[in-house]
Image: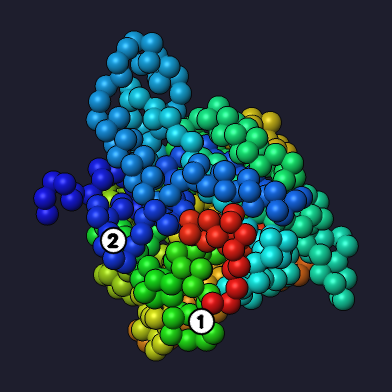
Amino acid sequence: MSSSLSPIHTPHRALVPHPQPDPSIFNLDDIQGDVYPSFPKKFEWFVFFTIEDAAAFKTALGNFIPSITTAARVMENLKAIAHSQAEPAESMVEEVKEAAEAVFSLGHGHKHKHRRLVPLRQYQLALTQKGFDVLGVTGNIQDSGFSAGQQADAKALGDRPGAESTDAKYVPDWEPVWRDNVLHGVILIAGESHLSCKAATSHAREVFGSTIKVVNIVEGAVRAAEPGHEHFGFNDGLSQPAMRGLVVPHVGQLQCDPGVILMGQKGDPSLTTGTPRPSWTKNGTVMVFRKLRQMVPEFNTFLEKNPTKLPGLTDPEAVALTGAKVVGRWKSGAPIDLAPVRDDPAIAQDVNRLNAFNYQSPTPGEARCPFAAHVRKTSPRFTTVTGLENALEGARIIRAAIPYGPDVTLMENTAKQTVEDRGLAFVAYQSVLAKGFGTLQKVWANNVQFPPPETTDPQRPTPGFDGIIGNAIGSNRDRTVSGTDPLTQAKTLDMPTDFVVAKGGEYFFVPSMTALGMISRGETLGQT
């Protein structure tokens, strides 16, 4: 491979874009950039809106399209960032400024001191089914979950029922801004600073003007204290799948055909089964947004009360081991399958060891990693169950989450109770909602029998819920997981409350640039 075709130097990035995807297959100017190769960001705002004037909105959209960040433009942004990280700051003033801020990094917890921040203003726009209706889009993208909307899916997802819920009508315990409003779309705005996002939001609002009404803004930010780590403290987003032809895979990184994420590409189920999608859906995807509140003090207290006591471990190490058993990775990101007793940050620093495991070596089973561990539930790596292997690849999603809210305060830690609103602005992309996020949440995380017994271990205990995002359906939120005690694997761990609570969300379609152009020109987006 020549130097001109070398991968962009992003050594700690989960998704390393292919240096030159086949242009006869992939048009990077047609794909919105957070879908692929994913926005580099320190801050991200989600601007949710309703359309007040459809005709005027289409005109404004035409004016806004040049601002939308395509996959090709993200590739250029990544090159600029890689270049900036290779050069020292030009002045002492710049060094002091950068030392006082969390320096922009593509990695997960890897700080690059004294490197220049690259100004970024990145946009992506997506629409709901209701937004389609208002704009006169009559074509069906052949995704019933998208068409119905997330609130209709809330009960099956296991979201807490609200006080208004009855046997006849389920009402999720969502924030009123999500529960009581009909959304038409969202603008994702990502950059290197709060000021960049604020300026970019002002620009978007100026372009669209009175054609939209902003209903809600969720402000996300990489945690300055622990870049790349979510509020529970775990390194996040490490199990991203590599789309064949678009991503250079690290050793052990799970892979999938691009059509698992991008409609109309190889691997899109609609190309071979069911009713074909309209041609204008090509290079589009379904986006999941979930506002997930994290009960951090309560989670920490739960771990402290349930240490995994093994010979030679200190009390803090025993508590940390329980957390790693529940998640499937240590806080550093090292997989517990490779570091079963103590954290090994060196593994987390090595992208070619980080995912080089399949729960089978040196022996199968759950002595090292419980079947119910979050990463084993939501990102399975191996199966001997007939017919399940293809389903595993078809359920891959691209995650693009970012934390929101402040770090835990001293008062909350002392009281062991959550006061401030904090959590994860969860984003996922897939070409078929039911096969992607729907499978991960409903069929895997909420299913106490998943994963099914392997032929190598048919007598193992019932795994239980995913201890992080698994939901018990209805008002009884009691959950159990098994396998956390390597000395007594059948022993269950009781979780009397939810540590991750959904407070709202919606399903969106992220159109290609071609489809956005058609909408802006008032062209018909029908069934062909």
Label 2: how many Cα within 10 Å (few below 14, some 14–19, many 20+): few
Return the x and y of residue 268 as percentages of the image width and height: 43, 75
Q: Looking at the image, is mark 2 or mark 1 earlier in the sequence?
A: 2
> Would you say 118 lies left or right of 82 here?
right
Q: Does residue 117 lie above or below 516 as drawn?
A: above
Residue at image point 53% right, 56% down: 517
Question: Mark 2 to mark 1: distance in Å?
Answer: 24 Å
Q: Which residue is mark 2?
A: 23
Q: Secondary structure at mark 2?
A: loop
> Would you say 30 lies left or right of 44 here?
left
Residue at image point 11% right, 50% down: 2
Residue in front for this viewpoint, 416 or 97: 97
> Would you say 217 lies left or right of 78 here?
right
As drawn, the residue found furthest toward the bottom would be 386
Q: Does residue 231 lie above or below 462 as drawn?
A: above
Q: Which mark is residue 80?
A: none
Residue at image point 33% right, 25% down: 115
Q: Which residue is mark 1?
A: 276
Q: Secondary structure at mark 1?
A: loop
As drawn, the residue found furthest toward the top would be 92
Return the x and y of residue 214 as percentages of the image width and height: 72, 43
- Residue 128 seen by the camera: yes
